[in-house]
Image: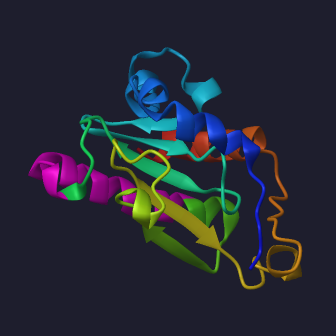
């Protein structure tokens, strides 16, 4: 059995209630720091944000404004915008980054891998053949070849133009 040391996770384990008392996704809604928070677009019911801990470059999330834990609790208007934003994100990512595929999904509940389980959000992960090379399987790490701020500027220009 492999042991993975992740001491930075201890603060989440010991102070879970304290840390999530103010949801990060909700907090970002009221901050006037879209660039710093890497928010690409705000709609009526949802917003699109870059993942600060991406699986690959261009890893986006579509986040409803409504603070709910699961997709079953989202109203139809929000669900429609969530789907529209997902489609638009795919179109823009194809144009900007030319991925060969995508993973789209949600981690609902801690058992499913949700890092922020109290606020539902949808992940959009662009994929390329070979992006899980030996570095991931042998070295147990990922290489993201472009700085998140550079990717943000590329994507932001397209979101501003296309929406």
Report whether residue 66 is seen: yes
Compared to 141, does 147 lie above or below?
Answer: above
Residue at 47% across / 51% down in the picture? 61
Residue at 29% across / 35% down in the picture? 65
Q: Residue 114 sits in which quadrant?
A: bottom left
Q: Which quadrant, please, contains the C terminus?
A: top left
Q: Position of residue 66 (x, y in %)?
A: 24, 36
Camera-nearest residue between 7 and 153: 7
Residue at 47% across / 34% down in the picture? 16
Q: Position of residue 125 (x, y in %)?
A: 57, 65
Compared to 72, does 20 lie above or below?
Answer: above
Magenta stretch secondary structure, dominant:
helix
Q: Residue 145 sits in which quadrant?
A: bottom right
Report whether residue 88 is seen: no
Q: Which quadrant, please, contains the N terminus?
A: bottom right
Q: Position of residue 35 (x, y in %)?
A: 61, 26
Q: Position of residue 60 (x, y in %)?
A: 54, 53
Q: Is residue 106 magenta?
A: no
Range shown magenta: 72-92
Residue at 66% across / 49% down in the picture? 53
Compared to 44, does 53 lie above or below?
Answer: below
Camera-nearest residue between 49 and 19: 19
Outermost residue, left side: 76
- Number of marks drawn: 0
Residue 27 relative to residue 136: left or right: left
Outermost residue, bottom side: 129
Q: How is colour applied across the structure in the image?
A: rainbow
Camera-nearest residue between 109 and 63: 109
């Amino acid at each position: 059995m492999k042991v993975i040391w992740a001491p930075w996770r201890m603060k989440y384990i010991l102070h879970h209630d304290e840390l999530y008392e103010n949801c990060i996704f909700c907090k970002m809604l009221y901050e006037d720091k879209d660039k710093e928070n890497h928010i690409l677009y705000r709609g009526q019911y949802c917003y699109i944000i870059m993942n600060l801990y991406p699986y690959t470059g261009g890893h986006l999330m579509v986040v409803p404004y409504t603070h709910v834990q699961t997709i079953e609790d989202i109203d139809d208007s929000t669900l429609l915008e969530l789907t529209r934003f997902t489609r638009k994100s795919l179109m823009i990512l194809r144009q900007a980054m030319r991925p060969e595929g995508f993973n789209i999904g949600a981690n609902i509940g801690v058992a499913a891998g949700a890092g922020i389980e109290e606020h539902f959000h949808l992940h959009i992960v662009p994929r390329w053949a070979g992006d899980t090379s030996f570095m991931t399987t042998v070295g147990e790490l990922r290489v993201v070849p472009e700085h998140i701020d550079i990717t943000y500027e590329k994507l932001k220009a397209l979101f501003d133009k296309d929406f």
